[in-house]
Amino acid sequence: YDQSISPKQFHLGMFEIGRPLGKGKFGRVYLARERSSGFICALKVLFKSELQHGTGVEKQVRREIEIQSNLRHPNILKLYGHFHDSKRIFLILEYAGKGELYKHLRKENRFPEWKAAQYVAQMASALKYLHRKHVIHRDIKPENILVGIHGEIKISDFGWSVHAPNNRRQTLCGTLDYLPPEMIRSGSKDNWYNEKVDLWSLGVLTYEFLVGEAPFEDTPIMTQKRIARADMTIPEWVSKEAKDLIKKLLVLDPEKRLPLEEVENHPWILKHCVKGERAANREKMASKM
Ligand SMILES: Cc1nn(C)cc1-c1nc2c(-c3cnn(Cc4ccccc4)c3)c(Cl)cnc2[nH]1
């Protein structure tokens, strides 16, 4: 992605717009091609009218742009640039060739252990990168993960991420299933800005990949109660190694959750993910820095 097609100023006329790819709570995403280079991307269109001034959503979009623009990792969806016109804001995003992960999960019902382990290893690598940059995603769930053309996963939608520590008030919406106990419990919100919240969500994600439903799925009231007690049962047909990892992530005390380095070296992950030599060397170099 060389400089020749990344001028500082983008505008709509530079793109041919293709088919709609999907829509979210705010805005739609279209397949797009940058005319001069033929570069394929995904164009996310948000209507300013939908982002009432001063509401959390406008700040979320600003934060999404600010945070995601500076991230470079194979398992994080790239934000190449943004621009706006009188009515709309446009985000120029990396095109993920195999679409939304949750659609694959619903279609397959649940993933075989080898596939779930590879996805969890990629998530752990992406979260390690984010946490090293003091970014907490805080909204890890299948709906916010896309699949690249080579089957690799890409975390997207940084609308809920924050630079730790952060004193902005957050209103919650959407599913409760992935919320960690410290975000369910009222009282001090300090823990909301501790990156350990992403470890809990990684545990919920691992469970949902393997079982096909979230561990605390219930009525909203019961879900909150079950999360607060880490009250879940793991089906007996889940392998003991996978059970072990889930239990070490879904721990009420954030400080006692398995650190990402240990997730990447967990027996269940090592059993299914042969780390390429180059990746292993990169890790070794990074750990020496
Ligand atoms: C769908 C689909 N099928 N195939 C084969 C590829 C895709 C694909 N989708 C994307 C998408 C994509 C689409 N929808 N969404 C969900 C959404 C939409 C609007 C606001 C917030 C969230 C993301 C992206 Cl960003 C980036 N790349 C994408 N690739």
Image: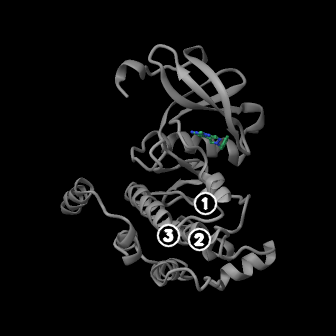
In which quadrant of the rendered view does residue 172 lie? bottom right
- In three-dimensional space, the C-alpha distance between marks 2 and 1, rounded to whole angstroms, equals 8 Å
Q: Please indicate, yes or no, whether residue 169 appears anywhere in the rendered image.
A: no
Residue tagged by mark 3? 113
Q: Which mark is residue 141?
A: 1
Task: Tell me which amino acid carries mark 2.
Answer: Val
Residue 66 horizontal/vertical position (percent):
50, 41
Q: Colour mode?
A: one colour
Secondary element type, mark 1: loop
Residue 8 horizontal/vertical position (percent):
44, 22
Q: Nearer the viewer, mark 2 or mark 3?
A: 3
From the viewer's perspective, tell me whether residue 51 is left or right of residue 126: right
| Few, some or many residues within 10 Å of mark 2 (<14, 14–19, 20+) | many
| Few, some or many residues within 10 Å of mark 3 (<14, 14–19, 20+) | some
Q: Give yes or no for contact between labels 2 and 1 (Cβ–Cβ under 8 Å).
A: yes
Residue tagged by mark 2? 204
Task: Tell me which amino acid carries mark 3.
Answer: Glu
